Image (cartoon, helix red, strand yellow):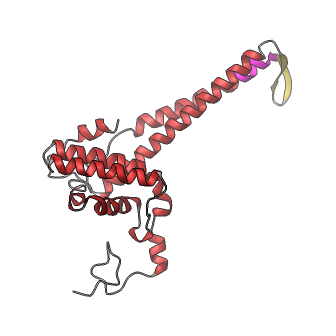
């Protein structure tokens, strides 16, 4: 076995030397996927709860993991989390910190789970949250336009077709036209949210796991 002291701590055990600094920079995604931290921890807490409920790990270990993950989340939210590019991504950063906080039970968190279904779940949770934020923003804008429409309900202005003055309309009518347009956009976000709100947890690397997991429980926990 080659000496792996100079290799990447996660993936380089069979190499005599570590990767070039340029390749390390290319492989590291922590610069942008740190935005998935809350979703990664939310999914991991749901997974840990399921592992405890099904007896795959002890209830004690499951609760220790869940509490440790809350501590990690608090550190991230407080800006005190030691992000490391050497750990490449948000998943390994969170797991490494969890191990430092709670020790050996942290190694059981990834039981019956692959990085594949983990990251797929994280992305879906993040996109779902962004859809919710877009819907909320559109709703607020629509309400503001309705207020303007009511205020200008009797104000006459020209309506245009083909860039030419066509018919007289009111300012309220003009504003409500935008409300209807935005409502269609809001519906598109709602439809996208409904279509992607499926839990990949349990798929593992590709075709599931031999552990007796409860996919419905994790899906319910994640909404």
Comparing 106 with 50, the one in front is 106
What's the residue at 53%, 37% (across, down)?
133
Residue 153 is situated, as x and y percent measured from the top left of the image, at 77, 13
Comparing 211 with 162, the one in front is 211
Left or right of 184, for residue 83 = left
What's the residue at 46%, 57% (across, down)?
34
Left or right of 32, for residue 157 = right
What's the residue at 46%, 76% (across, down)?
23
Image quadrant assignment for residue 217? top left
Q: Identify whether 53 is placed above or below 140.
A: below
Image quadrant assignment for residue 104? bottom left
Residue 147 is situated, as x and y percent measured from the top left of the image, at 70, 20
Q: Main secondary structure of the magenta part?
A: helix
Q: Identify whether 78 is placed above or below 152.
A: below
Q: Identify whether 86 is placed above or below 75.
A: below
Image quadrant assignment for residue 101? bottom left
Residue 110 is situated, as x and y percent measured from the top left of the image, at 25, 56
How many numbered dots are placed on residues in this image? 0
Comparing 103 with 187, the one in front is 103
Left or right of 184, for residue 101 = left
What's the residue at 32%, 56% (across, down)?
116
- Outermost residue toward the top? 154
Q: State the quadrant of the C terminus.
A: top left
Q: What stretch of residues is rendered in magenta?
A: 169-176
Q: Is residue 209 magenta?
A: no
């Amino acid at each position: 076995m080659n000496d792996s002291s100079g290799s990447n701590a996660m993936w380089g055990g069979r190499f005599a030397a570590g990767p070039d600094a340029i390749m390390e920079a290319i492989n590291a995604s922590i610069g942008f996927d740190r935005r998935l931290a809350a979703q990664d921890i939310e999914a991991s807490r749901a997974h840990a709860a399921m592992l405890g409920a099904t007896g795959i790990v002890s209830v004690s270990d499951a609760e220790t993991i869940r509490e440790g993950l809350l501590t990690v989340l608090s550190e991230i939210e407080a800006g005190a989390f030691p992000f490391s590019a050497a750990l490449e991504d948000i998943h390994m950063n969170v797991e490494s910190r969890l191990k430092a906080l709670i020790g050996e039970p942290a190694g059981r968190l990834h039981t019956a789970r692959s990085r594949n279904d983990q990251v797929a779940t994280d992305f879906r949770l993040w996109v779902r949250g962004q859809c919710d934020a877009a819907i909320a923003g559109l709703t607020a804008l629509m309400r503001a336009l309705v207020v303007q429409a009511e205020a200008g309900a009797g104000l006459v202005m020209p309506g245009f077709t083909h860039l030419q003055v066509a018919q007289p309309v009111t300012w309220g009518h003009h504003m409500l036209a935008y409300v209807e347009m935005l409502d269609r956009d809001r519906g598109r976000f709602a439809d996208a949210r409904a279509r992607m709100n499926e839990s990949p947890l349990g798929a593992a690397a590709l075709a599931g796991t031999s552990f007796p997991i409860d996919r419905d429980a994790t899906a319910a926990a994640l909404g």
